[in-house]
Amino acid sequence: MSRRILAAALASLLVAGPGSALAQANKPAAAPQKPPAKPATPAISPNHLALAREVMLGSGIARSFDSIIPAFAEQIRKQALTRPELQKDLDEVLKGLEPEMELQKQRMIGIAAGIYAKQLSEAELQEIATFFRSPAGKRYVETQPQVLDDMVGAMQTWTQDVSEYVMVRVRAEMGKRGHQLQ
């Protein structure tokens, strides 16, 4: 059952009240009704999808896909370490598969663009694309890998500091209540 249908069913029960549900339970069974039709998902125009793809690429998110396929190849190479005689042929096969793997990456970019198009209107995507085309937008995308690395490091330090702080505070408050924590 979809979330929308479940939410509608719960809402109707809430509006009708609990007595209504009991009254319905005592009525003879009626002929089964057709489930409510799903609201039509508006078609995504080619321009909408193209803007979604531009935003996806412009935002730098597609860079995350760039490392996945080489990681697969590296994993395969590691598994073949026990058979060094395969290395040359394996490298040739992996090299030969690169065009197919690029198609797979492009497929994922298309999927991601479709997700963006479902979540954002064409007008919103236009504004976002305009930002990513701007010098500030380009600089934003350029700095994201380092920003994210720095944020991860900062969060690790912050997590440790807050964890220690909370433990000190909890010990102090529990001490006031006559409990000693270690």
Image (tube, rainbow, N blue to C red):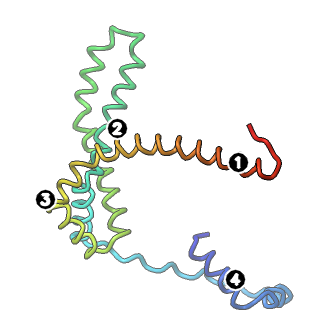
Which element is circle 3 on? Answer: helix
Query: Given contact means CB atoms under 8 Å apart, are the residues at marks 3 and 4 in contact?
Result: no
The local crowd at label 4, few if under 14, some if 14 to 19, many if 20 or more residues have their Cα within 10 Å, is few
Say which residue label 2 marks: 68
Say which residue label 1 marks: 172
Residue 7 at x, y = what percent?
61, 77
Camera-near label (3 vs 1) is: 1
- Amino acid at the residue labelled 2: Ile
In this rendering, is residue 154 above or below 123? Answer: above
Which element is circle 2 on? Answer: helix
Question: Does residue 19 appear left or right of residue 131 in this picture?
Answer: right
Q: Residue at x 22, y 71 (%)?
A: 127
Query: Given contact means CB atoms under 8 Å apart, are the residues at marks 1 and 2 in contact?
Result: no
Say which residue label 4 marks: 32
Say which residue label 3 marks: 135
The span from disc 3 to disc 1 (Cα, nearest Å) is: 51 Å
